[in-house]
């Protein structure tokens, strides 16, 4: 690495270089303090065992590098008045980012008890990775953060999402070389293929080649740096290398490199903004190769620490009991000369403090990283303009999601000026019947476009890429910076990114506890092409699992809606687009389906969460013999058809139909805010009558939800039970025991009042099911009587 | 593309070229037949509407390319006696692979009803994407397949897993350019950084640049081909380009290129096998750029079809009703001259049939793709050699997973000769206390190794890479080809690849229905570093969600074990390593924890699935006042501590402790084969006594599981309720209401017989909980009385 030292010219004046280096040392000092110290924060006394925390937690290894980048980003911001945010990919860099937002003053503004003095520093140290304190990762309570450490792989997709439609924003995205091994990260380099310099901001990726994970080398850390450069070049970047272990030399290279990158970015943007988009720039990216645990202890117990995997977490342990280790720690801390960095009160000395940007230019205070502050509400059209006329329930067919497509088309139009809405979808916008958006909006690509292409433009805001990770990561970044959107995807493959859904839910859950974080728009996920209508695509496409994942999340955040038709979908969609800080799962298929509710009925139904459908029931609002309940479009269709069959074959049986549109309404109210009170629950389901419940998802999940309700053992749930293959739509419900005839059989079995009549009717249902088996095998399609079944009197 | 035509030399003799082209046409013909025809398979009559299937399903676009590669792979195999399998990344290539395994004769051997004649061909066509037939994707019923279409992204990780420790095997892995957009695929190119030419087989990736997804261009399809080449080169490959639209020219290039690649692969392997491993070869990879829907209709309704996204699925639709479309289809089918390809009976003519390899060299019949056929049972050491002595329950601490590490160390040793066991783990083998394996085995890397490295070697079989997708994908490929292994990972981040777990479960579920598929070893996933002991790492690391995902899967496949200590972990691990066709989730933390059972007790306990722990109970085997049940290590610890507290504070209260180790044993037996019968259930839990159940996972999941059992409303479950942060271990159970004191309160509330004594004791518990809050905030650690609590008399 010595070569660079000689090669580098003196880009920075010695005076500024020295001050920047000290600022970096201050950040490093505070990082170590957070890991080790519970007392004596400024080292005014000799270090004693009782100054040390009882449990040493946190990660030193990546921190000096993160601090180094932060200090240089500060310089860049001040030099160019840049509007920048910082995304720390290395999950374990919590103390570094905390150190920096404390040094720049943001932290004390947001958390006034953590003052800029010795007392505040002591609290800063004690709270870190402590009960009632703050996590060891960059996380929601970290000012300036839109990206949580922990589950790795999403720093680039979040960064790109943040800068879409944010023309002035620069997202400095530090990619750890551990994270760089993940698939989602590797797949996210291609963000530039969707980034329009005329319209969007820029991401500056900094791949930090730290060399090691917890106990082994990283894959890229062991490559020749030129090979790593070739890889990023091949991903489409112009790559700059910053490498070395001599801080002064690396400071010079880094400062010059950052200026170069920034100048290039702005030049590309200006050119595109003045002359229109022409082609994809070779956006700059930086590879920064510095030792793991840089400036930390070189050797402990005769083992090399700095520059090895041993620097990953706590580089010198057992400090309370091992006097030699205590001495190493003290020497290490004193090597930064805290007495020169902080004044008598423990405040950063003014000549260093002035290196930080001012006000909202500080990365910890940039409002883009507190997206709710930037949020402009969506101008939503009236949903009545997209509503279908439903004269009589269950007699007409329509593709419900097509109405949502029209609604979103006009959302695009209405918000064209404020440029704050995007639709994300693997490659299925048309297939999912949302294609009306293409009347006004295009698919986004900054690649080559040919004459046969269908609605593709560098200006498009329909983001199609065959990666659920990218779709969801981009949308999350877009939302976290105060915008709005929808992720529409195949139900089964939403599981690909369900861990991201989990992590975003956790983010929101922590966020709502922090008054300084302004609420952001909800994460809206439309699950379409559902299990029941992936009859043609086969078993691998049949999986309603995301419902279970979201069910386990907190009631403060998690919502699941199962609109059965177009008008209820519109009402739900409007609500979701207006809502804040939720994860909204909307489940509905794209195929032509029966329509049940007028818009007014649908709105009222959505507000209740569930309702009795009187038109389908014959219990004259008295006690029915059996309740047929349903949640989801296909379960509703089968339930209605079962009700019709029962009413026509055994009119003396009194049935009631309850449709559930808001799954969380079934939860007891103490468990979920949408849970209807027990009186309303009993009004719907009676107190003790059998309930045959047809459910869109895995059947037993309903038992999880209704636990705590009145007489739950009378609920007999039919739903997806992991029976699937390539077959017909009706055969799917037969295979899973949820067909109308199965529901009839279940209802007949459960109604004692018609005990004598039931056996014959049950036999009749079984006959029909047998006939179905023969028919589909012979004709390769469903029997006519189920194919286009509708309600008739 | 015309340039290539001139440039290519005549590599193949015209005669063989012509025959190969005809074979390809036969495959294309059969592909189209599957999509369209229900009658008239050989086009012996003029095509009529009633010959057409009622619903046109399937994907033409990718199929001619897949067929082309198959035909050339056949030639390669015959030319070199190569041992090759074929993995079709493009999920929608089902009809292509079916066509080829039918042409080579494998299909009729496995499915005798699909004969090699007109009648069989008719059945082949009719079954495709039809009820009771076969899925439209490459899937489990497809002979020669170890990789299902559908969820995209895993073709390379499955291919690398297949060739690890399979020195002679060549996995030809076709990567679709749609799939290439996914993160998991992009991250999987790095498989070669773990591939040892001396020991492993080889993967030949063929990136098929087809240009389009359903309705838009692919990202790589729009790049200059030299840029795509640079990308794969930067991933470490030597890249060969096969490009064109003139079949004859492309045949020539492809044949020569495949020979070149194969020769290089064998040369690298021979060199390493003769002279020892020296450095990572630049393994060959092919980019094949051919038109989407190659040889299909050029134009339909004035729209370009071939070479555009319109060729993706059914390129000419509405064939039954539109006579012009019917004619286009007929001309298209006849363009392959079926009368020249198939004899009078409908069998492939001999001069073409002989182009297929023979016997097990046929890719549809290669036993590696039917891994159970190759499976050699693991030689397992006696678990007693790793058992801990437990004199008295709940009085000693040990890191349970450390014993598993010792066990696996000796599994490595015992099976060193047969080379069929690997351990997969992101980077945490040591951190998860499995590090004893490093006494005999190394981490695998074929990259640079430096002196400070810890147990790294190109010969290692501990696969550490910071990618759950790679760990799991490699293991799946390894298992599907008949070997054994374990994926050990942080519980929370197992969610990253949970959609893979779902898809593998579906694969196994289909597989057990097919007698010709020999059973393979189970997918064993060890979830350690669990939510309860990620107190230090914070909320993002706290998530037991994979339990819910696996709970929804079929009882024929899904297993969840929650061993509470070392000896039960050993007994479970032994069972899992011996089991077949299951997905086994084993959940246990890595920290020092209380030990409860001797090995014999543990084995008996595992066999039962759950047991009453008499030593902890004081109900004298009569009816208790309350049952304290638990599943999982920390819930068990809290339950035992609660029992102790209750017994010491209120001896008149009769408590029973039930520990559940096999979660599926709680299911009713009709729902899961492990479900214990109702008598046994009542013997454990009584018929009507209150049960306070402490559960490792999301609390309400238990209600889902026990639905159908006796008096389920008496079960009061405490578990993870998504409350987390960076804190202490005991604070984690407090936050989630599962601490010993919470359990005591719950038990006291539920036991009417001690109603008078309960309020004071409840108040005492609440006092302790308050004291805890103050203590941890002051001391940054747990109260001494809970920190190392153990049972004492």
Image: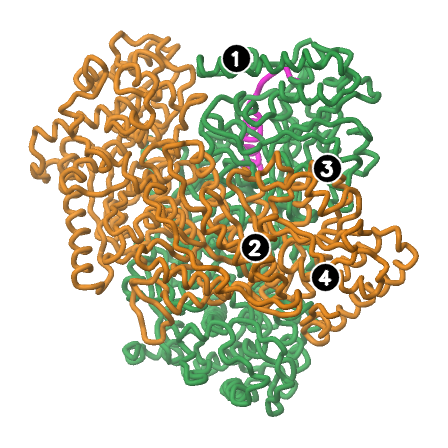
Chain colours: A green, B orange
- In three-dimensional space, the C-alpha distance between marks 3 and 2, rounded to whole angstroms, equals 41 Å
Q: Nearer the viewer, mark 2 or mark 4?
A: 2
| Above or below for B792 versus B517 | below
Write the start and end of the magenta stretch as one range. Answer: A394-414
Element type at marker 4? helix
Q: Residues within 10 Å of mark 4 (few under 14, many from 20)?
A: some
Q: Label 2: which residue?
A: B603
Q: Which mark is residue A783?
A: 1
- Secondary element at tag 3: helix
Between disc 1 and disc 3, the foreground one is 1
When asked about the image quadrant of residue B97, the answer is top left
In the structure shown, which secondary structural element does the residue marked by tag 2 occupy?
A: helix
Side (left or right) of A341 relative to B613? left
Rate crowding at label 3 as few (under 14), some (14 to 19) or many (20 or more) other CA atoms within 10 Å: many
**Of pointers 2 and 4, the one earlier in the residue sequence:** 2
Q: Is residue B542 above or below residue B436?
A: above
């Amino acid at each position: 690495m010595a070569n660079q030292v000689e090669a580098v010219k003196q880009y920075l004046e010695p005076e500024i270089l020295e001050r920047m280096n000290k600022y970096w040392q201050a950040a490093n000092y505070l990082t170590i303090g957070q890991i080790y110290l519970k007392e004596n924060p400024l080292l005014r006394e000799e270090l004693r065992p009782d100054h040390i925390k009882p449990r040493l937690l946190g990660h030193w290894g990546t921190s000096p590098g993160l601090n180094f980048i932060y200090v240089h980003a500060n310089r860049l911001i001040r030099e160019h008045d840049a509007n920048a945010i910082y995304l720390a990919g290395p999950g374990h860099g919590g103390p570094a980012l905390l150190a920096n937002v404390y040094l720049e003053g943001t932290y004390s503004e947001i958390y006034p008890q953590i003052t800029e003095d010795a007392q505040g520093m002591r609290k800063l140290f004690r709270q870190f990775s402590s009960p009632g304190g703050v996590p060891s990762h960059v996380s929601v309570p970290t000012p300036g953060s839109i990206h949580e450490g922990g589950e790795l792989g999403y720093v680039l997709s979040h960064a790109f999402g943040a800068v879409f439609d944010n023309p002035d924003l620069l997202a400095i995205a530090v990619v750890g070389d551990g994270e760089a091994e993940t698939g989602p990260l590797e797949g996210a380099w291609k963000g530039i293929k969707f980034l329009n310099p005329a319209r969007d901001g820029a991401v500056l990726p900094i791949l930090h080649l730290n060399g090691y994970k917890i106990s082994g080398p990283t894959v890229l850390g062991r490559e020749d740096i030129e090979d790593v450069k070739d890889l990023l070049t091949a991903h489409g970047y112009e790559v700059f290398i910053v490498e070395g272990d001599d801080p002064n030399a690396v400071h010079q290279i880094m400062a010059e490199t950052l200026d170069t990158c920034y100048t290039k970015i702005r030049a590309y943007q200006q050119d595109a903004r003045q002359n229109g988009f022409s082609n994809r720039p070779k956006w700059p990216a930086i590879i920064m190769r510095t030792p793991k645990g840089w400036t930390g202890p070189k050797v402990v117990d005769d083992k090399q620490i700095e520059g090895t995997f041993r620097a990953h977490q706590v580089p010198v342990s057992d400090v309370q009991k091992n006097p030699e280790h205590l001495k190493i720690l003290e020497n290490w801390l004193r090597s930064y000369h805290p007495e020169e960095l902080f004044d008598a009160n423990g405040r950063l000395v003014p000549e260093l403090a002035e290196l930080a940007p001012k006000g909202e230019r500080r990365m910890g205070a940039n409002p883009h990283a507190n997206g709710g502050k930037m949020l402009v509400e969506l101008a939503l059209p009236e949903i009545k303009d997209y509503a279908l006329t439903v004269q009589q329930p269950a007699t007409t067919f329509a593709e419900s999601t097509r109405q949502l497509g029209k609604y979103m088309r006009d959302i695009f139009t209405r918000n064209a000026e404020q440029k704050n809405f995007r639709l994300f979808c693997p490659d299925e916008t048309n297939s999912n019947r949302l294609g009306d958006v293409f009347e006004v909006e295009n698919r986004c690509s900054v690649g080559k476009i040919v004459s046969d292409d269908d609605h593709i433009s560098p200006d498009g805001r329909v983001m199609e890429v065959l990666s659920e990770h990218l779709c969801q990561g981009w949308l999350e970044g877009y939302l976290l910076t105060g915008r709005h959107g929808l992720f529409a995807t195949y139900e089964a493959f939403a599981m690909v990114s369900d861990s991201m859904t989990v992590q975003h839910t956790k983010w929101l859950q922590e966020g709502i506890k922090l008054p300084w974080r302004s609420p952001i728009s909800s994460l809206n996920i439309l699950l379409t092409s559902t299990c029941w209508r992936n009859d043609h695509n086969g078993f691998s496409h049949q999986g309603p699992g995301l419902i279970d994942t979201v069910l386990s999340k907190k009631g403060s955040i998690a919502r699941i809606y199962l609109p059965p038709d177009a008008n209820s979908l519109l009402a739900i969609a409007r609500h979701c687009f207006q809502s804040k800080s939720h994860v909204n799962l909307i489940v509905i298929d794209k195929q032509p389906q029966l329509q049940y509710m007028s818009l007014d009925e649908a709105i009222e139904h959505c507000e209740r969460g569930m309702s009795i459908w009187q038109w389908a029931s014959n219990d004259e609002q008295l006690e029915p013999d059996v309740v047929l309940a349903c949640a989801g479009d296909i379960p509703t269709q089968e339930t209605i058809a079962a009700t019709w069959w029962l009413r026509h074959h055994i009119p003396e049986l009194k049935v009631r139909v309850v449709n559930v549109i808001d799954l969380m309404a079934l939860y007891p109210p103490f468990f979920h805010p949408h849970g209807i009170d027990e009186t309303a629950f009993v009004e719907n389901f009676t107190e003790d009558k059998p309930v045959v419940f047809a459910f869109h998802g895995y059947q037993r999940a309903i038992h999880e939800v209704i636990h705590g309700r009145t007489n739950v053992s009378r609920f007999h749930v039919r739903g997806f039970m992991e029976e699937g293959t390539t077959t017909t739509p009706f055969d799917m419900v037969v295979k899973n025991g949820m067909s109308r005839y199965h529901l009839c059989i279940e209802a007949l079995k459960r109604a004692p009042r018609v005990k004598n009549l039931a056996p014959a009717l049950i036999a009749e249902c079984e006959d029909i099911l047998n006939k179905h088996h023969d028919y589909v095998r012979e004709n390769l399609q469903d029997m006519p009587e189920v194919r286009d079944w509708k309600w008739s009197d």
